[in-house]
Image: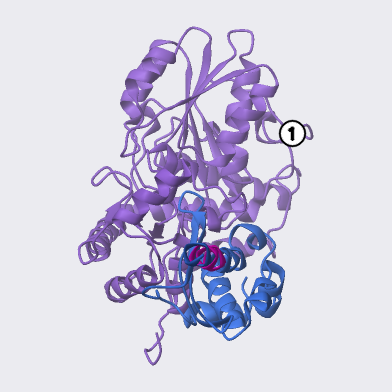
Amino acid sequence: MVGQETRHVYMDYSAAKPVELRVVKEMIPYMESSHGNPSSMHTFGQVAKRALDESRTKVANLINAEKPETIVFTSGATESNNLAIKGAANRNKARGTKILTSSIEHMSVVNACKSLIKEGFQTVFLPVDKFGLLDLKKLDEEIDDETTIVSIVYANGEIGTIQPIKKISKIVHAKNAYLHVDATAACGQVPINVHNEGIDLLTISSNDMYGPKGVGALYLKDGVHIASMLQGGGQERGLRSGTENVPGIVGLAKAAEIAKDEMRSESERLITLRDDLIHGLLDPVPYAFLNGHPAKRLPDNVSVRYSFIEGESILLSLDLMGVYASSGSACTAKTLQPSHVLLAIGLKHEEAHGSLMLTLGKQNTQEDVDYVKNLMPSIVKRLRKISPLTPEELKKQCIRTK
Amino acid sequence: MYSDKVMDHFKKPRNMGEILNPDGVGTVGNPVCGDLMTMYIKVKNNRVEDIKFKTFGCGAAIATSSMTTALAKGKTLDEAMAITRESVAESLGGLPKVKMHCSNLAADALRAAIKDYRQKQEKKIEVQK
């Protein structure tokens, strides 16, 4: 580890992304000169109001929403997920109190659903297969006339698996329930068409599309009714009170516009890098495996696992070499529990501990990929040399502790 | 998140490896929790003459294992038995709070190795009797 030239290779784009310069430039006027409140009737207010309207159109265009008014701006994906699930559940309580979701959702969906359980709702966390694809048969079995909302992630950010949303939607709509889709990781990477795919509510994150943090959106199909969570001045059709974050919203809209124009070419570029990196991480190393689906996969997502070693020590070793990534290991989590997503796809705890997630982005190049590919085998080799585990020993130790 | 000393021991672990025909072996933790460590000792004149470790776990687990061996080497068995999780963490310039319990098991593994050695000795004496 000594004597080599250190590069800085950021491969944790799903944790946070840099804001595009084109986005920053678009935002600046709304922080400086055009700082009005869209609710004010004077010229300053109307300039801000116009920016808000134009932003709504741009975000609606990205997902082929029927009209701009279907977009509600929020403080980010966590708020959008909470508003969608709690809002739909509470508003439609008279019709039923059952909520369906998957076992590989983001914590903002998991915990929103759990909080509803305390209020008397029933939540079912549907299983997924070893690739992370939703069990459609189970969805069909569980959905009933009491079900008002089904919340499924478009593509999980940890393992990258893209769900068959159109098929899911057909099952959900056959029972007249709403389909909420958390598109935080997917939006801006893969084309989403709420109309064709039959999506009733859709969560959008700004930073995941190279927009600023602290802003997001919720698409609400025309005619879908939900309850609001914040009481105040009635902004955003009464669904999200509070003076609009105009610079943030303008940034999100610009990011959406860029994503719409450049998604195809950037995704093609990322898929080439992604597949090259996956092969480079797995092929030269024994007992190395891919997490998630090999083909139905987000362009930016590389998720692998190495037996006999632990994820945090892989991350530390990479960090020392200027590579920044993440892991589903318990040792990197505040809870000291391995990622629920990795456990849901059937990994044992000791397998989840050895996971490594690299998410690619605009600034990554083939040189970055080559650098990581070259580094990884020696890191794994070193940590395995320190580790007492071997295939036989792992089996023995796991039996011992059961 | 880690001190320089922790990173130093993570980068250059002291006494890493196995001892063939050790006088005592101690293993603590389990792979399900994400931490497993084994200590091997050679004892001469009631002192830890040689010590080696193997660890599966996070950076803190590797660093505490390394530091434990560094502290124990050359000590009498009673002195080595007195090494605690706290004294290992202190020698490393502190550990993050969440790592104090799950990843700081090396001192326990060392004590298990010494106990293993002492039990083997007792058995030997019994056989001789």
Left or right: A233 as drawn, with respect to A226: right
- Tell me the blue chain: B
Looking at the image, which is closer to me, B82 or A110? B82
Q: Is residue A223 above or below residue A58?
A: above
Q: Which residue is mark 1?
A: A230
Colour scheme used in the picture?
Answer: by chain
Looking at the image, which is closer to me, A270 or B52? B52
Residue B14 is covered by the magenta coloring: no
Left or right: A131 as drawn, with respect to A258: left
Percent across and percent down for residue B128 are 48, 67
Q: Is residue A26 above or below residue A222?
A: below
Asked if residue A20 shows in the view, the reply is no
Rendered residue at 50%/65% (across/down): B120
Rendered residue at 65%/51% (across/down): A246
Most common SS among magenta residues: helix
Percent across and percent down for residue B53 are 47, 72
Asked if residue B84 shows in the view, the reply is yes
Chain bearing tag 1 is A
Looking at the image, which is closer to me, A323 or A255? A323
Check the rendered structure and report the hue given to chain A.
purple
Element type at mark 1: loop
* Residue interval drawn in magenta: B116-124
Residue projecting furthest to the bottom: A3
Percent across and percent down for residue A185 are 44, 47
Quarter of the view holding residue A380:
bottom left
Percent across and percent down for residue A273 are 26, 63
